[in-house]
Image (cartoon, rainbow, N blue to C red):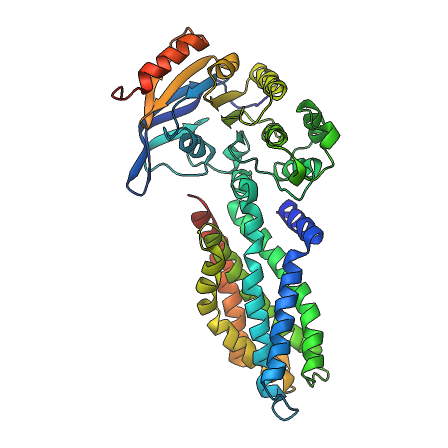
Amino acid sequence: MFAIIWKDITLEARSRETIASLLVFGLIVLVVFNFALDVTPANVIDLAPGLLWVAIVLSAVTGLGRTFLIERENGCMNALLLAPIERSSIYLAKLIVNITLLVVFEAGLIPFFILIYSVPIGGNLMALCIVVLLGTLGLAAAGTLFATVAAGTRARELMLPLIVLPLQIPLLISAVQATSMVLAGHTVADLGDWGMILVAFDVLFITMGWLAFELISVD
Amino acid sequence: MSEHPTNEAAIVAENVERRFGNFRVLRGLNLTVPRSNVLALFGPNGAGKTTFLKLLAGLASPNGGSAQVFGCALPGDAKLRRRIGVVAHEPYVYADLTARENLDYYARLYRVTRSDRAADLIEQVGLSGAAHRTVRTYSRGMLQRLALARALLHEPDLLLLDEPFTGLDPQGAQTLIELLSAEKTRGTTMIITTHDFDRGLAVADRAAVLAGGKIAWESEEQLPNADEMSAIYTTTVSPGAN
């Protein structure tokens, strides 16, 4: 599993294709909405969380498929499936790579988001990071699982958003609500049902990916 | 060499069927390959050779019949996959890694403990001068040599070679024959699919023709020469023969 992670990170470090496309896409979304909407100090807590998560989810969906697309070139996916490792650990390795890429992307996106919308983060930066991380886990877990399915189809660029975006709706709503609460000054312990939904979504899709990967990856 | 028992057949396929949609590629294939034997498998395009090798490698499951590799029912588990090496139509290497990085990666995946194994193989397949170049700059023949090194890296007990001579120049083909002969001496069981009778028979000690999704001809004790094989092949795969 660590060999796969090392290889994917090495390939990304050389090309920087995924990180670059994630960042460019995310920043464009934030900039465009900044001009399209009149975000003021009075409504920033209502509007900004939605804008942040739209930027994260749309960028992620465009970038998550790449971890399996690099395996399609030269038939490397078959080599992974031939390897003497549990096939579910391929899913876990790809999930860890996707989470790492998304966290790096978000580390660039969130300071820009705070700056451009003058978000009153106060002392709640850590709580915001926890909420974003919980959302990222679920996003990456579902995205990684369905990227496997999409990578095997002809219209793979189209298939991944079509499959993943509808599934992400509960995660997206919970993440937006939890982010709103954090920006309003609540702590992580106050998140209640929204926090529980985020955790449940994470557990559900990581478990599903772990169990289903072998079934969906072998012909 | 493996410490597994040697009295078992390496491959036993009984009435193996494989469909893609409504199209039956393999139609009741029966084949037994004893351990340490090298089988040259000939057949026309679309006969099912690649599909059969994919089944044996555990990359696909049969829709009917049964197949065993080293006594383990297919598609098998991680332990069985450790004993299999594959050279396929695609080289299974990463274009943006160097040859050495690719082999180091596969060595870690297969838990190869010999630290000099990758360097040894790169030298054996004649890629020493290009070992630190990214694979994207390689020619088709160089990719094929690297694919062979990757397949041999973990010293498999079963080698599945799908048209391994494709893209190789005469010197590369000779290197491949020498490497396969060394593997044969080591006791590796091999299936080689090819359209080249001379080269296929150069390392084989059995031959078979796959046509119409099943074994249409299998050699007896005496292996035919290339000319005889060509005549057998033509008769076996001619329209109406199956």
Who's the residue at 56% across and 27% down the image?
A: B167
A46 left or right, relative to B126: left
In what quadrant of the picture does the C terminus of chain B appear? top left
* Residue that protrudes farthest toward the bottom in the picture: A42
A118 relative to B227 in the view: left or right: right
Count the marks. Answer: 0
Is residue B224 something that shows in the picture?
no
Q: Position of residue A134 (x, y in %)?
A: 59, 69
- The quadrant holding residue B24 is top left
The answer to whether residue B75 shows anywhere in this view is yes
State whether residue A156 is above or below residue B183.
below
Q: Is residue A150 left or right of residue B124?
A: left
Which quadrant of the figure has residue A58?
A: bottom right
Q: List the single residue furthest toward the left.
A: B240
The x and y percentages for residue B62 are: 36, 36
At x 52%, y 16%, the residue is: B199
Choose between A172 and A63: the one closer to the eye.
Answer: A63
Residue A189 location, x and y as percent?
61, 79
Residue at image coords 74%, 29%: B129
